[in-house]
Amino acid sequence: MKRKYDEKLVEDVLRDFPQDFLGEPLELLDQQTTIGGFRPDLIFEDLKGFPVIVEVQLKALDRNHLYRSIEYRDLYREEKGSEEVRVILFCNSIPSKYEKILSTHGVDCIKIRKREFLNKLHSIAPKIKVVSASWEKKISSSLTANSLLREIQKAPTENNNLFAPDTLIFWIAWMSWGVTDYVLSYPLAKVYKGNKGFISFYELTDRARKPKATIYTQFGPTDVCLPLEIFACVKELENIDPHHSHVLETFLDLIYDFPLETPFEISLGSYKHYDPFGWDYYIEGRRRKFRALCGYYGAEEGYDISKIQKDLELLLSIKVYSGKYPKFVEEKVFASYEIMNGPGSSREFFEYQREIFIRHRYEENFIQKLDLVAQKAEKEWITIRLNDVSHECVQAALFLLNHVERHTSEFGSLMKQCDRCVAPPRQANEIPKNALKLSSKFFWHLKPSTYDNVGIRKTVKET
């Protein structure tokens, strides 16, 4: 039977062989039971009938485990009404600064080196084969995010057949922070990332926050910002100029700023006439973005529908892969679109105002004139309806367009590194599977999404 050397293995060994490792015959009462909301590793009963709480820690005893065990003892006394409760800490070594604390609080501590523990286990239970984690065998203890990126860049071409042929892979800095703001020099061993290493842009409402992963080094635990790995089909983007790219960015910014709802609507109106549909209210706080779109798509009479349609098709062509190796999910910024005449849901504002005028007994001539003005103004409005918007994909597309706007005109290719890339982009299907597997363990990725029964895209919950 193969087992990884970790706290769970040590815990199970102590459970099965207390005499050999704890030095006395103990009878198991419970393992990982709940006491006052906490879970001590093991609870035994000694020959005198007294409870014995055993807490396991790999490597050197630390303050957290020491005081946690004392708290377990106090909670057990309170819950079970037992005065004579013993505590045993089992670890690899004991720093001298904790020896007096252990004595003061009457806590026993058994220390045994890893090699000694494994040799003893082998002599007692030779059928248990202790192995290292497979990914730990493949990387050195000095592997950093920078060195991992270098290894990926040097990796020989290997067609992995996981992506469309025009898919590129980008490693980018988070939001507006440059590479120099990253702590990439710590060894990447035992990386712990919230939510299993996925980033959900829409849920991260505080844009001042950086997603951090806790890593453990020879200097102890520290928080580190890791690159976001994006796989995207972006061939069509290389043909657009920086000004056009900026307009598309503005369009996506509006999508990202609005609340998540479906179908998602953006209505473009006009200042030429009386404002019956509440244009000022509708664009409040987003005037510069709306005016940029109106200026780009506006025509002498209304808007250039063909121009808008062409850009929507361009955005629709951007495909982003969410998830991690080997379960990549192809997603789009939105699933489909419609372009309609009129103010869309903004008409509700007009109907509400009209109802107020009727309720306050305005003259019928006034209501008729109001309707005529609305009919004339309505012809100058269009509404763009997007179905099944993925806000994670929107944010990824914003980065890609930003990359185009700043660097395609200068370098002529999306394969060039920009000031937010932490490594030059590469062809995704040329990356070997073992490199993808490794990067999936360390870097951030887009969270896969799904739809509920009314079409609203929901983030997949991790189990």
Image (tube, helix red, strand yellow):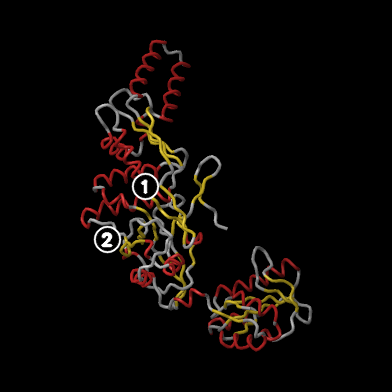
Residue 398 position (above or below residue 55):
above
The answer to whether residue 16 is left or right of residue 437 is right
Q: Nearer the viewer, residue 140 or 285?
A: 140
How far across and how far down the image is residue 50, in percent? 76, 77
Q: Which of marks 2 and 1 precedes in the sequence? A: 1
- The amino acid beneath tag 1 is Ser
Task: Tell which residue pokes out farthest to the left in this image.
Answer: 410
Q: Quadrant of residue 268?
A: top left
Helix, strand or loop under label 1 = helix
Q: Position of residue 174 (x, y in %)?
A: 37, 58
Residue farthest right in this picture: 48
Q: Could you tell whether 106 is left or right of 331 in the image?
A: right
Q: How many angstroms separate mark 1 from mark 2 (CA)?
A: 21 Å
Q: What residue would you read off at disc 2?
A: 416
Mark drawn on residue 273: none
In this view, the residue in front, 73 or 382, is 382
Whole-percent x, y for residue 435 in the image? 41, 69
Q: Nearer the viewer, mark 1 or mark 2?
A: 1
Label 2: state its secondary structure: loop
- Badge 1 is on which residue? 317
Q: Residues within 10 Å of mark 2 (few under 14, many from 20)?
A: some
Residue sitting at 61 percent across and 71 percent down? 68
The N terminus - image quarter: bottom right
Quarter holding the C terminus? bottom right
Q: Is residue 29 above or below residue 283?
A: below
Q: Nearer the viewer, residue 385 or 292?
A: 385
Answer with left or right where residue 414 lies relative to residue 349. Answer: left
* Residue 154, quarter of picture: bottom left
Residue 77 picture location, percent across and down: 72, 70
- Write the residue at 26% across / 51% down: 405
Question: Callout 2, which amino acid?
Answer: Lys
Image-quadrant location for residue 69: bottom right
